[in-house]
Image (cartoon, helix red, strand yellow):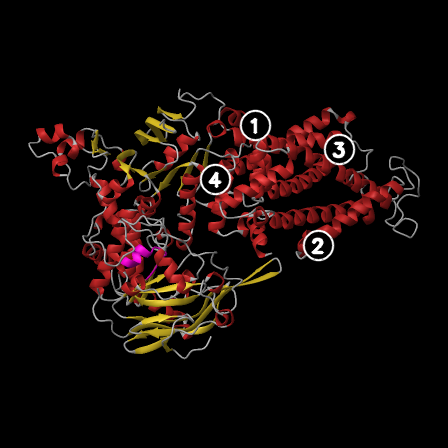
Amino acid sequence: MTGAAGGLVLRTEELKTFYVLDAFGTEKIVKAVNGVDLEIRENEVYGIAGESGCGKTTLLKALYSAIEPPLRRIGGKVFYVRDGEEIDVYSLGREEKRRLRWEYVSYVPQGSMSVLNPVKRLKDSYGDFLESHVAGKTRRDTLAIAREHLHQLGLPPKVLSAYPHQLSGGMRQRVTIALAALLGPRIMIGDEPTTALDVIVQRGVIQLLKSIQETLKNTIVLVTHDMGVHANVADRIGIMYAGVMIEEAAVERVFEKPLHPYTQYLIESLPKFGDKSLKKSAPGSPPSLAELPGGCPFHPRCPHAMDVCVQKMPDIVTIGEDHKVACWLVEGDRDGRAA
Amino acid sequence: MDALLEVKNLRKDFAFGSLLSRLRITAVDDVSFHVMPAEIFALAGESGCGKTTTARLILGFEEPTAGSILHGANRKGRRRKREKVWFTQGVQAIFQNPFETFNPLRRVECYFFETVHNYGLSSGRKGAETLIDETLKAVGLSFREVSGRYPSEFSGGQLQRVSIARALLTKPSLLLADEPVSMVDASLRMSIVNLFKRLRDEFDVSVIYITHDLATAYYVCDRIAVMFRGNVVEMGGVESVLMSPKHPYTKLLRASIPEADPSKKWKERISLTDIEHEEYLRRGCRFAGRCPEVMDVCHETVPPDVDVDGVQVKCFLYDEATMRTKGREGAADVG
Amino acid sequence: MRVLRDLFEDYRFAFSFTVLCLLLILALLSAFSPYDPTFWWHATRDLIPSWTHFLGTNSKGQDVFWQATYAVRNSLIISVIAGTVSRVIAILVGMVAGYRGRLTDRVLMFVSDSFLVMPLFLIIVLLAMLVREHMNLVNLGLLLAFFGWAWDARVIRSQILSLREREFTQTAILSGTKTMRLVMKEYLPFATPLIFSTLINNMAWAIGMEITLAILGLSNMDIPTLGTMLQWAISYQALLLGWWWWLLTPIVLAIFLFVALYWLSVSISEYLDPRTRIQRVGAR
């Protein structure tokens, strides 16, 4: 468990980013992120769970301000909170954004090969990287820094002389994470960093992330559809469905007392060792982000759907300490934000 | 009861490299197991363990370097050159990625009609449609929903069901499912996995379930074989193997699975190997490089298969002869 | 048709389609020609364009316009024969080599590669000289087809090789599909854009070769084609004598034909590309 979660480190307000596609005259709008309010705190591991096609990868891109057409920001804001001051990310110039990247917020994608230059040895990649962010260091200095950094993380410094393809998938991923942590960023964003990896290797990679977090005392935003990974490493989880956050709470709460019907289905359907009782899935299938149903996006599959669910998107409600749900079934302190 | 499928000492070598430097990797090494009728049997392991190669060998897409595969009727084990195993033995397969399973440019129903036509399952269009509709209903779909549509018009879960339905058309006795739910969303997995259970209970279909997801394997399978770098290291009832693993690799695997329960987090830090293909080339036990309980003999000789309470384990720790010469208590006594 | 409407959104297709239609009409008009194209002196020589002779007359006393209709028709016939026959050969060779592999593949690719490295031009010239008397439209088309398949056979083969590794091949095999049918039904749709664009490129190449052979004096000069028209104009010094209508007609027609064929091939193959096709299926 991390220490007391302090102030915020990242905040979004009504964030909306859609893909606007135009293929042979037919226009299609994919509402990948459809009004998301997030408050991510210092010194925590925040997990974002959800299935494929729920918009979580797009949300990450928006948080990292890596938005390119056909993805467009339709509305809302993203704030980084630095030294108590809020910075509106989308109002920054290119140079400022560049400096923020990797120093304040860094990104670990799913495939490590997209970060590492395949024709350069790792030490050159690390070297280039350090040189473009830290002025006045010679190549020897940067190499020493890199070696020390890897050593501290428990990775063999000899990998620096290798090319990316010579390393195994797990090692590459760990090296990429080490690269992302090199400048001690306040936020590290991981997009399914372990999805393509084997179980044992996954454990090593996740443990590396955890040890980085404990050392730097920063924030890690981890996106994965694997609830087991969240259970092991996250402090708080946000569940995403069809472009909106439908539930958010401390990890124990989500597993013990999920409030949203979708989360309930999700938790109940997870297979557990020692439990051979019948597990059931949610009926139906997730909606296409291009053709969302009106009102609450889950209502076509929800066994408790009411009239209001079909008409209006539920407000976000806070229950007790820190448990937020977007569902008409749940009563609590309303957040006052209408759909 | 006779086994439906028997695999004996199966071996498959792959050779890489040029004329000057050839590397021979044994992807499947002396693998033996059997599958009974109406049983769900898991072949589990991480990537590179040989489970997919074993599946291809069983289906006949590759030729084994040594060993034999015996199907129910064809006990002799030697297949005539042109005979296709699925055609005569009622074996079908389902693959991991439903969107790759079907040609994106063809309507999904084409495969159904082709199957009906090629296997002579029904005559005339009407008869074929009825049969296809029945089979689709068994997986929770209908012909009306499927007719005229291309693979991209379905969701992953639906398309996987369609794939299962196609495999069921010929009323196979054995179904090979290669990671059937790994690409399906978590909230929909169970419905497909439950489908396999129904097939076993209602239609007497056996399933060889190939996966790296041990949690789902625990839920759905009856027996399991854990593979590591081409060997079967532990095989037995899924309750014994997964709840009280004996082989050090199985123990490590089981402990590394992130459980969906915040109270059961990983305890220790582990260290990972850097170079994987070295493990294929070991003389003795392939796991000797990482095993926390490794002994000298492990590096020299391949361990024997020992039976421990109904579970077959490939490890010297359970071999009484070895343990006695080591002057230690046999691990079988310690348990 | 929906397909046509989609295609017409691409200006290249619209242009090429229109031009080709016009050229086709021109070719069909040859059936109504009042003059036999092989006869000379049916009009006064070297007249500039006028209402009686739309494009003037040439030094052989023939009406240039009606000659042009025959020329376009014949050139198109040659290129269509060359293109389709070579496609058929390329598809057969490429598909069999790609799917069967091993010895069949080696042998077929050996043959195909031999055709590729041969100095095609010299051999065609040689053969043309030999069969000059028997050279008619069909024979010329077949001669060109015989040499135009090797490149595309290899391209189609590599397409098949990659498709063979995809999972739906296994599904088709498990459905009991036999080899030939599998290749035709499963792989051909992927190869279609390839085949189509190479067909059109091949047609353009055939026309070009025909013009070249004609200018070298190796084809039958009695049959009016774009090449022979040009050759006659050159040998009669049309450029120096300022009889632009005779010289420009085959040149302009040839240019339009080449551009139209090229743009047609590019726009249609973009439309048929499996990746965009799949996107379109989803977008509907």
Read off the magenta span: A222-231
Q: Secondary structure at mark 3?
A: loop
Question: Closer to the N terminus: mark 1 or mark 4?
Answer: 1
The image shows residue A250 at horizontal and vertical percentages of 29, 66
Residue identifier under label 3: C217
* Residue type at the position of mark 4: Glu
Nearest to the observer: residue C41 or residue A317: A317
Between label 4 and label 2, give the one nearer the viewer.
Answer: 4
Q: Position of residue A108 (x, y in %)?
A: 34, 58
Q: Are marks 3 and 4 in contact (CB under 8 Å)?
A: no
Disc number placed over residue C167 in the picture, else none:
4
Provide the residue designation for mark 1.
C114
Nearer to us: label 3 or label 4: 4
- Residue mark closest to the camera, 2 vs 1: 2
Upstream in sequence: badge 3 or badge 4: 4
Q: CA distance from mark 1 to mark 4?
A: 33 Å
Choose between A150 and A75: the one closer to the eye: A75
Q: State whether residue A288 appears in this view.
A: yes
Say which residue label 2 marks. C14
In this orientation, which residue lies closer to the viewer: A185 or A205? A205
Mark with earlier residue (4, 2): 2
The residues tagged by marks 2 and 3 sit, at their Cα atoms, a distance apart of: 36 Å
Give the amino acid at mark 2.
Ala
Q: Nearer the viewer, mark 1 or mark 3?
A: 1
State left or right for residue A170 relative to residue C95: left
Q: Amino acid at mark 3?
A: Gly
Q: Nearer the viewer, mark 2 or mark 3?
A: 2
Q: CA distance from mark 2 to mark 1?
A: 39 Å
Pointer 4 chain? C
**Chain ID for label 2?**
C
Categorize mark 3 by other alpha carbons within 10 Å: few (<14), some (14-19), many (20+).
Answer: some
